[in-house]
Image (cartoon, helix red, strand yellow):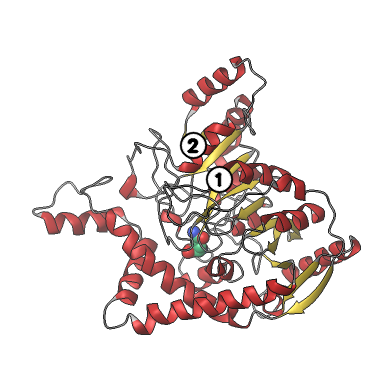
Amino acid sequence: VETSYKRIKEVDGEVQAFLTLDEERARAKAKELDEKNSDDKGLLYGMPIGIKDNIVTKNLTTTCASRILENFDPIYDATVMGKLHQAETITIGKLNMDEFAMGSSNENSAYKNTKNPWDLNTVPGGSSGGSAAAVAAGEVLFSLGSDTGGSIRQPAAFCGVVGMKPTYGLVSRFGLVAFASSLDQIGPVTRTVEDNAYLLKAIAGHDQMDSTSANVNIPDYLNALSGDVKGLKIAVPKEYLGEGVSEESKQSVLDALKVLESLGATWEEVSLPHSKYALATYYLLSSSEASANLSRFDGVRYGYRTPDAQNLIEMYKQTRAEGFGEEVKRRIMLGTFALSSGYYDAYYKKAQKVRTLIKKDFDDVLEKYDVIVGPTTPTPAFKIGENIDDPMTMYMNDILTIPVNLAGVPAISVPCGFAGGLPLGLQIIGKHFDESSVYRVAHAYE
Ligand code: GLN
C-alpha cells in the first residue's frame, strides 16, 4: 500500500489515472490485515487495487467521471467490492474513465485527461483508461474496469497490460452504474495473465442481486495456466485482418500465431460475415439502453441539481443540460430517437435481429475451434486531441472488440509487440463461460 501511494505521488501528477484516493482507509485496512494473526488469508491478501469510478463503493465518491455525480457517495458496495473484501484486497482509490463509460480515449471525462504512460502525448484508450494506465504505470498491481464494447480490452492494448472481458453474466453487475445493461461486464486489468486469472477468480460468481447473473460452476482458472496448447484449434477471422486494420497490427498477430504454432496449436482462417454490421448495431442498441438507464439522473434522487430553476420541468432540463457532457447527450438523443414509437421497428428491433446473426457467427466458429484470435485494435494508441472532433473515427476504434460484447463471449487482450514505440494487443476470444481456454492460450503466448 505504501509503495502504491509513493508511486502515485511520483507519477500521477502526469499520468492522472486517479480521480479519488482513499489513503486513510487503505492504510487502516493494511494495518488491520497485518495484525490479523491467522493462516486463513484471502486469495489476494493485502494486494493494492484501483477501481473504475463507475463501480459503486460505499462512502467513497463514485462519479462515473460525470458532473452529474460530482458529490455522489454511495450508501452500498457493488457485489464485486464485497468479493474483493473477502479476497482481502485493499482499495487504493477510484480511477478515471470516459463519462458513463462512453468513449475510447478518456477525453470524455468531465474531470481530467488520463495519459498513456508509454507516451504522455497519447491517449490511454477508454473507457477504462484510468484502470489500464494505473496498472501500466505501476501505481497499482490490479484494477477493475468495465467493458461494454471494448472498454477493458482497448485500453489494455494501448497501455501494454492484460485486460479481460468475461462472459456476459459471469461477474455480477450489481453496483456497476449501467450504461448498456445487455452488454456491460466488469473485468480485471493486470500486468500478467496469472494475476488476471487470480482477480477473475475472486470476483466471478452467481449473485441474486443481478437477474442476468449466471448460475454456473466456476472452474479454477489457475489450472489453465500450464503453458500447454498442444492440439488446440485457433480460428482467425479474415475480417479481423482486413480493411482498416494497420499493417503493424496484422503483422503482430501473424507473429503471435507463429509462436502458438511452435507450441503445438494449429490455426485456420474463418469468416464472421456479419461483423461489418457490428458497429452500427452496437451504437443503436447501446445508445437505446443508455437513454433508458440514464433517465434516473434527474436532479431529484441523487447527484447534481441545478441551483436556479423556476419549476420542476425546468429543473429536470437544466440539471441534465448542465450535468451531462456532449458525448453522453449525443448517445441519449440517438437512443431516444431509435426507441421512439415511429422508428422502433426500423432501428431498435432491426438491430436486435442483426445482433442475433452476429452471435450466431461466433457460435458457428466456436463450435469447431477452441478460440478465435485477432488484433484487439486496428492501430496503437493515438495522440490526445487527434480524434476528438470526429465521433465516427473514434467509434471505429472498437470495431474488433464490439462484436464480442454483442455475442456475449469472453475475450482477453494481452500485449503483443509494438508499433512506433507503442504497445499492441492480441485479442483471444473464447466460448461462453470458457475463460479457461482464453487464459490457457494467453498464458502460453505471454
Ligand atoms: N468505446 C465504446 C463506446 O464508446 C465502448 C465503451 C465501453 O466499452 N464502455 O461505447
Which mark, residue 144? 1
Rendered residue at 75%/71% (across/down): 369
In primary-sequence order, the first of circles 1 and 2 is: 2
**Which residue is label 2 attached to?**
82
Label 1 beta carbon within 8 A of ligand 1: no
Residue 169 image position (x, y, % from top left): 52, 56
Specify the farthest residue to the left.
310
Q: Position of residue 76 (x, y in %)?
A: 38, 37
Q: Residue at x 26, y 46 (%)?
A: 304
74 vs 135, left or right, is left
Mark pair 1, 2: CA separation: 13 Å
Which SS class for mark 2? helix
Mark 2 surroundings: few (<14), some (14-19) or many (≥20) residues within 10 A: some
Relative side of 341 to 223, left or right: left
> Is 82 left or right of 320, judged from the image as shown?
right
Compared across the picture, whether 256 is left or right of 84 comes to: right
The residue nearer to you, when weighing 326 against 26, is: 26
